[in-house]
Amino acid sequence: MTDKDSLENIYLSVRKGLMRVVSRMVPPKEIEDIVQETYVRICSVKQSEQIRHPRSFMYQTARNLALDHLKRAETRMGVSMEEEGVNPDWMTEELDQVYDQVSAKQEFEHFCEAVRQLPLQCRRVFVLKKVYGYSQKEIAKSLNISENTVEKHIASGMRRCQQIMKSGSIESPRKSESGVRQGRKS
């Protein structure tokens, strides 16, 4: 049960807290207006004595006013975009394309890192086959190994890259190379 004078005193005691809450939701230039509007709304309550928890009531009023402000801002943004001839669907398509490009680039970088983790000989064979398109015979001759070994390295490289890509576990290249130097068989 609260009268108007009590509400004013409570408002003054929580004003800074209201500003903090509102500041998380709206631009700085709008904070003061929303907090003042909170006070106006509280003063306009006809049966203030029915407010059981005035502090909570004030915080909720301030939050609601901030949310209303955000909704109006979004509506204004949509209307101004339409007035400017900007098609939001076009922007969505454009953003989707940018997202797809970034995603493809990240996936390619992830793949390159997976290839870097292959043992040295396997990596050489894999790159010659998959990147440069050499035949198994050309790779065998170039690296002075059998075609059967080339085939095994390609299969092993594919399997390992798939595992690394699926698991998402990328080691640092130095860690991978040091593991090869220490005699770890792959």
Image (spheres, rainbow, N blue to C red):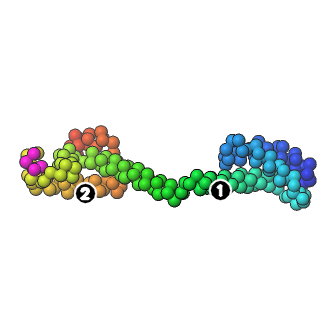
Badge 2: few (under 14), some or many (20 or more) residues near its Cα, within 10 Å? Answer: few
Q: Is residue 56 visible?
A: no
Residue 130's disc is none
Residue carrying label 2? 159
Residue carrying label 1? 75
Q: Nearer the viewer, residue 17 or 75?
A: 75
Q: Secondary structure at mark 2?
A: helix
First to last magenta residue range: 138-142
Specify the principal SS of the magenta part.
helix
Badge 1: few (under 14), some or many (20 or more) residues near its Cα, within 10 Å? Answer: few
Q: Give me the C-alpha separation between circle 1 and circle 2.
A: 52 Å
Q: As drawn, is 119 to the left or to the right of 2?
A: left
| Kind of residue sitting beneath label 1 | Thr
Magenta span has 27?
Answer: no
Q: Nearer the viewer, residue 46 or 86?
A: 86
Magenta span has 141?
Answer: yes
Q: Which residue is painted at 56% across and 54% down in the image?
A: 85
x then y, percent, for residue 33: 76, 45
x then y, percent, for residue 143: 11, 45
| Kind of residue sitting beneath label 2 | Arg
